Image (spheres, coloured by chain):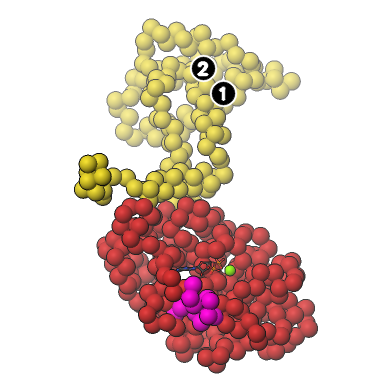
Chain colours: A red, B yellow
């Protein structure tokens, strides 16, 4: 069946789905994998700017689905990695222009040529989320250590399981270790206790993420960035590598336990 | 001073992170079974209202809680302390006159619960035996009436 389709989802908006998708795409490509990233957030196109590819767009996802463009024509090759491609979202259409079946057909074609197809899911639990979920072999759920984000994550975890796409793995993003130490933020262990999903990545809050999106060069290409390193670790875990969790001055015991959990899978 | 104390004991003090965790646990419990907290309280009141028609209940020690092992396994666990053979159990009789339909319904619910309880009791129920026997008698007495009532209701 070829490549693997990995959907990045969250329920709540603004938690880091697009950031995660861009960085996983880059990291997997730098590991030598052939990767295509799809922006499924139709009407709110963003993955293109985060990856610095906005000025190369000719066709988009809806053009492919409606037959105005061949798949290859719409795929934009990354400037630095010639194994990495982007399929941008349409900016002036709405989510109903694409169906879950369209996404399955599209990804089935892509699986033949690529190792990974990453889908950046829109926020919400409606059509856009369904489009992103339907073709998924695995779902990565991004959450921030914060009540509304964790609550929404729980909601979509339920939907993902109901659609037989579960259990999925968690990316905890924007963890502020100083606040966790003071007891003023949920720790990754707390989030694990509440949601009960395996954690595939813990990404610290990092100002360099903003600089990266300003410049269109994903943070994982910045070797100074802890968030970048953490995203790179997630990519290696996606690729099946057994990577220990990096020390974030969070409660130390947890990392060992999580590694154990990951090994158990 | 308070500042120093809270610095010293800062770790033991409950930070907002712990509050967030408690609040999330609570809200997710209700999200997952799709029953908001107020409706849950309403249900508990209704359950109790049925039980006190038949038994004298120590209302202050009643506990009906949702236990959740994970996202897909929830159970409602009730602990309802019942007074044993005190003079005030005359209250039972006092509670009798109810609408026929209502009582038949209450009876049905009660039977369901008893069936399960008997199964559970079947093994280690030594201590509770006298009470169980009494309950069964009480039940027998009850059994004579409601079928007729529910029949008349069906008509
Ligand atoms: N680890 C992080 N540290 C700091 N800022 C972050 C981090 N992850 C994401 N952000 C910021 O959060 C905002 C939302 O991220 P985005 O990926 O667009 O979320 P989503 O796609 O889920 O809506 C962006 O401004 C992004 O720069
Ligand atoms: Mg986004």
Q: What residue is pinned by disc 1?
A: B106
* Residue A262 vertical placement versus A224 (above, below): above
Q: Residues within 10 Å of mark 1 (few under 14, many from 20)?
A: some
The residue segment tinted magenta is: A210-220
Q: Position of residue A180 (x, y in %)?
A: 34, 57
Farthest front residue? B1
Q: Cα distance, mark 2 to mark 1?
A: 9 Å
The foreground one among B83 and A7 is A7
Q: Residue at x 54, y 55 (%)?
A: A152
Label 2 in the same subunit as label 1: yes
Q: Which mark is residue A256?
A: none
User: Is residue A227 covered in magenta?
Assistant: no
Farthest bottom residue? A82
Mark 2 or mark 1: whose residue is earlier in sequence = 2
Q: Are marks 2 and 1 in contact (CB under 8 Å)?
A: yes
Q: Chain of mark 2?
A: B
* Residue B151 vertical placement versus A81 (above, below): above
Q: Position of residue A149 (x, y in %)?
A: 50, 56
Q: Is mark 1 within 8 Å of ligand 1?
A: no
Q: Chain of mark 1?
A: B
Look at the image and tell me in which quarter the C terminus of chain A lies.
Answer: bottom left
B13 left or right, relative to A199: left
Q: Residue at x 38, y 82 (%)?
A: A223
Helix, strand or loop status at disc 1: helix
* Residue B92 vertical placement versus A149 (above, below): above
Q: What residue is pinned by disc 2?
A: B53
| Residue A5 seen in the current view | no
The foreground one among B100 and B46 is B46
């Amino acid at each position: 069946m070829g490549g693997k389709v990995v959907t990045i989802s969250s329920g709540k908006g603004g938690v880091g789905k697009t950031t995660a998708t861009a960085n996983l795409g880059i990291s997997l490509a730098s590991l030598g994998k052939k990767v295509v990233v799809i922006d499924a957030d139709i009407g709110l196109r963003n993955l293109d700017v985060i990856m610095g590819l906005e000025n190369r767009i000719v066709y988009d996802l809806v053009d492919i689905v409606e037959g105005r463009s061949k798949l290859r024509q719409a795929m934009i090759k990354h400037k630095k990695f010639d194994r990495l491609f982007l399929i941008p979202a349409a900016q002036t259409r709405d989510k109903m222009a694409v169906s879950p079946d369209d996404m399955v057909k599209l990804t089935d074609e892509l699986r033949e040529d690529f190792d990974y197809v990453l889908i950046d899911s829109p926020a919400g639990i409606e059509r856009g989320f369904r489009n992103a979920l339907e073709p998924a072999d695995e779902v990565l759920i991004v959450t921030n250590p914060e009540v509304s984000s964790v609550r929404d994550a729980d909601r979509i975890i339920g939907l993902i399981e109901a659609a037989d796409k579960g259990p999925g793995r968690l990316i905890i993003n924007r963890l502020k270790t100083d606040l966790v130490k003071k007891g003023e933020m949920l720790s990754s262990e707390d989030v694990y206790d509440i949601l009960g999903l395996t954690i595939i990545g813990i990404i610290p809050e990092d100002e360099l993420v903003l600089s990266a999106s300003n410049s269109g060069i994903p943070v994982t290409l910045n070797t100074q960035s802890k968030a970048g390193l953490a995203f790179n670790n997630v990519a290696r875990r996606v690729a099946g590598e057994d990577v220990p969790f990096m020390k974030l001055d969070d409660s130390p015991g947890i990392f060992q336990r999580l590694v154990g959990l990951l090994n158990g899978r | 001073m308070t500042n120093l104390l809270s610095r010293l004991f800062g770790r033991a003090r409950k930070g907002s992170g712990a509050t967030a965790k408690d609040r999330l646990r609570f809200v997710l419990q209700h999200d997952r079974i799709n029953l908001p907290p107020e409706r849950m309280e309403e249900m508990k009141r209704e359950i109790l209202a049925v039980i006190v028609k038949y038994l004298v209940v120590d209302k202050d020690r009643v506990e009906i809680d949702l236990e959740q092992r994970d996202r897909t396994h929830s159970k409602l666990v009730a602990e309802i302390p019942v007074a044993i053979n005190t003079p005030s159990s005359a209250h039972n009789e006092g509670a009798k006159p109810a609408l026929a339909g209502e009582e038949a319904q209450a009876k049905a619910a009660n039977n369901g619960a008893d069936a399960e309880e008997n199964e559970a009791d079947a093994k280690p129920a030594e201590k509770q035996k006298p009470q169980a026997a009494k309950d069964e008698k009480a039940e027998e007495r009850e059994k004579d009436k409601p079928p007729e009532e529910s029949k008349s209701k069906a008509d």
